[in-house]
Amino acid sequence: MITPMTDNEILEILIKQLAITSDKERERFLSPDYDLHTHPPFLMNDMNEAVERVLDAIEKNEKIAVYSDFDADGIPAGAILYDLFKKLEFNNFINYIPHRNLEGYGFHKDAVSKLKEQDVSLIITVDVGISDYKTVEFAKNLDIDCIITDHHEPNGDFEKLKKSAVAILNPKREDSTYPFRELCGAGVAFKFAQAILQRGKENDIARFKKIKNGWEKWLLDLVAIATVADMVPLIDENRVFVKWGLVVLRKSPRAGIRALCLKTRVKQGDITEDDIAFLIAPRINAASRMDNPEDAFLMLTIDNANKAEDIVSHLEKLNNKRKGMVASLTRELVKKFTLENNLPAVLVAGNPNWSPALVGLAASSLSDRFKRPVCIWGREGTGVLKGSCRSNGSVDIVKLLEQSKDVLLGFGGHSGAGGFSVSLENVDKLKDVFSLNYEKIKNEKNTIAPAFVEVEIERVDSSLLDAIQVLAPFGVGNPKPAFKISGEVNSFKHFGKDKNHIEIFLQNKKARIRVFAFFKTLDSFGKKIEVGNNISVLATIERSRWKRNFIEMRLIDFI
């Protein structure tokens, strides 16, 4: 018999599970405050040098290029500096985003040459560049200064990078003086924007004096999008950014955001972190995966409503096309791995005909299904073999790639996801090398089951859902609260075009509830059930996207 509990009693149990022990920690977590709980930007290494170089460029009207990555972190990061320069009425700048298929990931010499032809004298990278010391050296030899802003793990060439760059803003530097290392690329760009505004006002520069104190908070919608999309931990400063970024996003005047909400039938005033993860970020990423990343950049920066609608419609088509291609690739790989006996510790597959822009999405789905790291490779339009890895939490992907660097041409990323390039000569060695190195560095703590609260089915209602929202935003580092419920199987089915989603209705004598999971089947859980069976499941609570008054549960696992 389960002891009845009030919403507040359940909430207190969930807070204890978060290991919050002091009143100060509790206040910081439950009421994240922008002024109290963010860190001064000048605590970041090289921030002073970076800011002074930008202020000098603005004063002399030098041409600046903002060079950003092409994903849902890099594009909002580039938009942050775009908005800042526009607000400062400084127009001698351009945003450059490399084409994913034609140029590939990274800070490229060919791009620097193009920027030199356009009289650029300062390049600011965002969400990229920490591994590209040769390109920074190349730029320096062309009399172009480089400020590197990034959040990826620095590799062994960091000291060489320091010799050529004007400044390197990255909280993951080994010598970092910044209190929080888990910012995304847009988070670093935001701290840079904060610092530029602060110093400009301190120096009593006319164009800065026109800007109201606190204006930069309007950029938090972009920071929130990138922070959720890049799956960095929603703790410390990131929690503040997403909490208040959602507030900004719900009333954002951005024409592209408004058009996207209309297109996807999402009420802008109700946007959540789930909407960022499942609606906004995929459409930003679809631009670079399927076509031109500048379309996503325009969606975030354009101020013409009619043009914004056209861009959003285009991105919607690209995203639907992307979903179809990824689903086809995933089906092919599921079939391949399902037929294999004794699956290796790390699943590896590839094909020169596969697009590197899509393999990461397939790897993510497969990692979830097969509960192990997955690395998939394809070939870029440039002819380079590139792959993406996704972790199931049992290993740090960057450490895995570092251990395997002898067979790689290059690599980068963070603990949950990473990318690599490999020669045709070594590509067949990946399967054995990755699995061997996995055994050396795997994280045994991954076997710990998630904490949960056991409740009766009838307790899963709007009141409980509203009560636990004080713990939001949810994501990496702060997962949605898990609940155990038990009941009789009233009905179950697989649904969707490919029958790759599961729906179960559980009931007791007082209530009935829908439990579902996307891109999972009963086989995914190694479970067989029948109508009338009594089962227990672990699931999270959410409000139906299509029936706003309907409460349902997203399946985590069977118990």
Image (cartoon, helix red, strand yellow):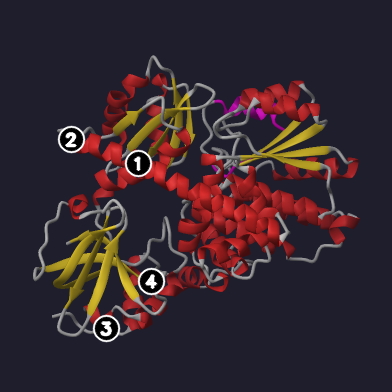
Mark positioned earlier in the residue sequence (1 or 3): 3
Residue type at tag 3: Met
Q: Earlier in the sequence, mark 4 or mark 3?
A: 3
Which of labels 1 and 4 is toward the front?
A: 1
Give coordinates of residue 141: x percent, y percent: 75, 20
Residue under label 4, please give it: 544
Q: Which residue corresponds to mark 2?
A: 339
Q: Which residue does the image show at 39% across and 42% down from the upper left?
A: 326
Quick one: SS at disc 1? helix
Q: Is residue 547 left or right of residue 161?
A: left
Q: Amino acid at mark 2?
A: Leu
Q: Position of residue 177 (x, y in %)?
A: 60, 46
Q: Which residues are magenta?
A: 157-172
**Label annotation for residue 5:** 3
Which quadrant holds the C terminus? bottom left
In the image, 55 versus 555, the foreground residue is 555
Q: Would you name the residue on which mark 1 appears?
A: 328
Question: In which quadrant of the rendered view does residue 404 lie?
Answer: top left
Residue 122 picture location, percent across and down: 77, 35
